[in-house]
Image (cartoon, helix red, strand yellow):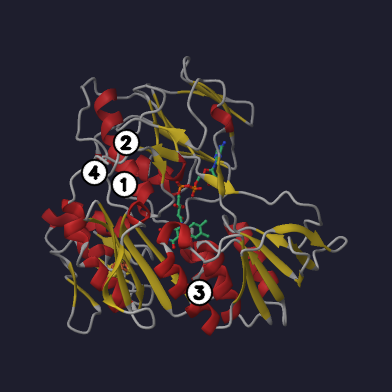
Amino acid sequence: MKVVVDMNKCQDHGQCVFAAPDVFRFDEAGRLAYVPDPDDALRDEVEEAADVCPLQAIRIED
Amino acid sequence: MSAPVVVAGASMAGLRAAEQLRAAGHTGPITLIGDEPHMPYNRPPLSKEVLAGKASFESLAFRPRAAVADVEWRLGTKVVSADLDRRRVRLDDGGTLSYAALVVATGMRPRRLRCPGPLAGRHTVRTLADARGLRAALTRPGVRVVVVGAGFIGCEVAATAVALGAAEVTVVDPLPLPMAGPLGELLGRALLRRHEARGVRFALGAGVTGFDGDGHVTGVVLDDGTVLPADVVVESVGSVANTEWLDGNGLDLTDGVLTDKHLRAGGRPDVVAVGDVARFPNARYDGVPRRVEHWSIPTDTAKHAARVLAAQLGGAEPEPAPFAPLPTFWSDQHDFRLQSFGAPALGLDDVRVIEGGPDGDLLAGYHRGGRLVGVVALGGTGAAAAAARHRAELLKTPALTA
Ligand SMILES: Cc1cc2nc3c(=O)[nH]c(=O)nc-3n(C[C@H](O)[C@H](O)[C@H](O)COP(=O)(O)OP(=O)(O)OC[C@H]3O[C@@H](n4cnc5c(N)ncnc54)[C@H](O)[C@@H]3O)c2cc1C
Ligand code: SF4
């Protein structure tokens, strides 16, 4: 599974970090970092993260 | 499971309900009926990024999950009535639809002021069309703006109007502080100072008794006789639930649709309410039914209601744990963000500063019976992250019995 975050839209809300901590995290500078090609077993978590992003910045590309 | 589901209201909560029904294993037909001509779109930017012109109107569209590619969308169509005993809804195009299960997702509309005066020049912000009209008005040079209502949407619009270069922006409210109802005095005062420092004026403790102007509004009349000159008026004075179409079915519709702990309405296993329109008890707190107009609620309610409905449609006894979401809310105003987790409104009598102070980044904790029930951060993204660190503690909070 491929995950793309539109960093122009992302405002570091961090909702995705709660929903899918295995895929999204904040780096030391407080900016969002993420795993671009997570294991398919994490699909539910990642879909949930995409749902809760207030800026709708997360896209899942199969 | 070929039982047809009808979803009334084709916005965020309706879309999420359809997606979650598929995720819960419902394979039967789903029809979404929405009176707006658009596919579901995201509302929060309508008072922020999109109103400011920093994001396009097109960027608001939600991307429906692939699992709902086969659902039927009846857009530009209104549900005019429902017969819950016969499991039928009637549409404004004259058609009727039968269902095995009904999802109520018709949301809210802005409350309007009834006092006398012209209508032209007075705006509300709920839909794409509203935001387009307001943006056109706010981007005319030198406009004087009066915002009636110092809640979240009103304060966001005021901040955006200042950023767009409005000549004057004044927020009117009968209460003494902005946003103090949900957030309390400490935050209300901090917010007032920050808005004033960025050029927003306030007329607090003041009611609106009328509008001046013939044809187009030219001023807002306050209850002490003052007239605030205005080219643009924004009414952000709360909202009214879209439930008229459910009248006559014995439901409690006094403020949205009253539901049980599984979001079912009127004791009917085949009718659920989701999103802004649902008045549900939250088992995490005191069990008092409330409507919650937070962006996180459509997704939370849809997930729970879909599980309950799918079990019911599949002939199983649905008994998941009662609905107990952790409410989350944010609001962007000027260069700062408010981020809230939990239910601060339940802990207004015991607000403590956890970190920072009223002038910089501020993190406040709201307590009830000595226990943390909500946190609110005000400041930059660092403050929001600090609030998030208390999320685990809030999630642990067992149901309150007060
Ligand atoms: C300007 C604005 C800014 C916001 N900002 C924030 C924010 O910063 N943070 C936050 O947490 N929340 C925010 N919110 C709240 C959040 O957007 C709402 O909670 C959310 O949109 C609710 O979605 P919903 O689907 O339940 O209701 P709605 O989006 O209201 O959807 C209901 C839909 O049903 C349609 N409908 C109504 N009656 C009928 C009928 N009889 N037949 C057919 N269709 C019908 C309506 O036209 C509408 O399309 C904001 C809301 C607004 C308006
Ligand atoms: S939820 Fe969205 S906006 Fe927030 S950090 Fe994640 S991707 Fe960025």
Amino acid type at mark 2:
Ala
Q: CA distance from mark 3 to mark 4?
A: 32 Å
**Are circles 3 and 4 on residues that touch, CB within 8 Å?**
no
Q: Amino acid at mark 3?
A: Leu
Say which quarter of the image contains residue B101. top left
Query: Are the residues under marks 3 and 1 on the same chain?
Result: yes
Q: Tell me whether the residue at label 3 lies in contact with that at label 1, contact meaning CB atoms closer than 8 angstroms.
A: no
Percent from the top left, x then y, of residue B191? Answer: 46, 73
Which quadrant does the C terminus of chain B fall into? top left
Image vertical order of residue B31 relative to residue B182, above or below: above
Say left or right for B393 vs B349.
left
The residue that mark 4 highlights is B400
Query: In this rendering, do the residues under marks 3 and 2 share a single chain?
Result: yes
Q: Are marks 3 and 4 on the same chain?
A: yes
Marks 1 and 4, the one that precedes in the sequence: 1
Residues packed near mark 3 inside 10 Å, few (<14), some (14 to 19) or many (20 plus): many
Q: Secondary structure at mark 2?
A: helix
**Residue at the limit of the structure toward the top, as seen here:** B86
